[in-house]
Amino acid sequence: MLLARAIHFDESDQNVFFCPARTGEWAISGGFEFSNWGKSDLVGKARQAFANGWLGLETFGRVTFVAVTRIEPSELADLETRLATHFVEIYGAPSREAAQPVAAEELSQMADLCAEHAPNTVLTVRRELTEAGVREQYRFIQPDDARLEQFAVHAVPDSE
């Protein structure tokens, strides 16, 4: 299975996001954070997070670029639990058990997005507010064009 990890080409994310994600942490779109936002919320660093930030799943910070890479089932299970806990602590979900299916769906959507691309493909997101809500568009930069092998390498566990 494939998912995406945060990558950085420079230090700009440190300056444009309130809480930047760390290089290498797993990431999802995280558009749910903006589901009840209006135009008045789109100012400064919050606007930058809305406009093009992926959500890191360790820091819950934002990152501009992610790269597709392989994820192990045990890592995915840990992310699901971490995200469900985040839904309880930050968004008021009644319990981790109640939030677990929503967390699983968020991760599944990201896995579906990544499944269409080769490892090391770089992804960007662009969001806009519409009358119907938040609209997300994705851009993909193929690894041959990006030359990013060193950024999105994922260790393969010993198979012995």
Image (cartoon, helix red, strand yellow):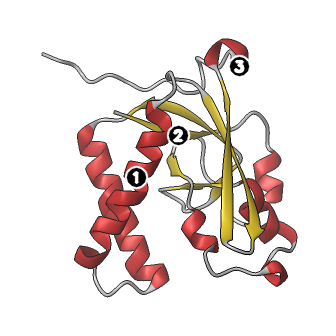
The disc, 1 or 3, on the residue closer to the chain's N-terminal end is 1
Q: Which residue is drawn at 38% across and 24% down?
A: 155
Q: What element carries label 3?
A: helix
Up the image or down, 150 lies above or below 93; here it is above
What residue sits right under mark 2 in the picture? 5
Q: What residue type is labelled 3?
A: Ala
Up the image or down, 148 lies above or below 47; here it is above
Can residue 22 be seen in the rendering of this structure?
A: yes
Q: Distance between the residues labelled 2 and 3?
A: 15 Å
Q: What residue type is labelled 1?
A: Leu
Residue nearest the observer in this picture, 105 or 73? 105
Q: Which corner quadrant of the image does residue 138 belong to?
A: top right
User: What crowding class fits label 1: few (fewer than 14 Cα within 10 Å), some (14-19), or many (20 or more)?
Assistant: many
Q: Residue furthest right?
A: 44
What residue sits right under mark 1 in the picture? 107
What residue sits right under mark 3 in the picture? 146
Residue nearest the observer in this picture, 59 or 137? 137
Could you tell me residue 81's position as x and y percent?
Answer: 30, 62
Quadrant in which the C terminus is drawn: top left
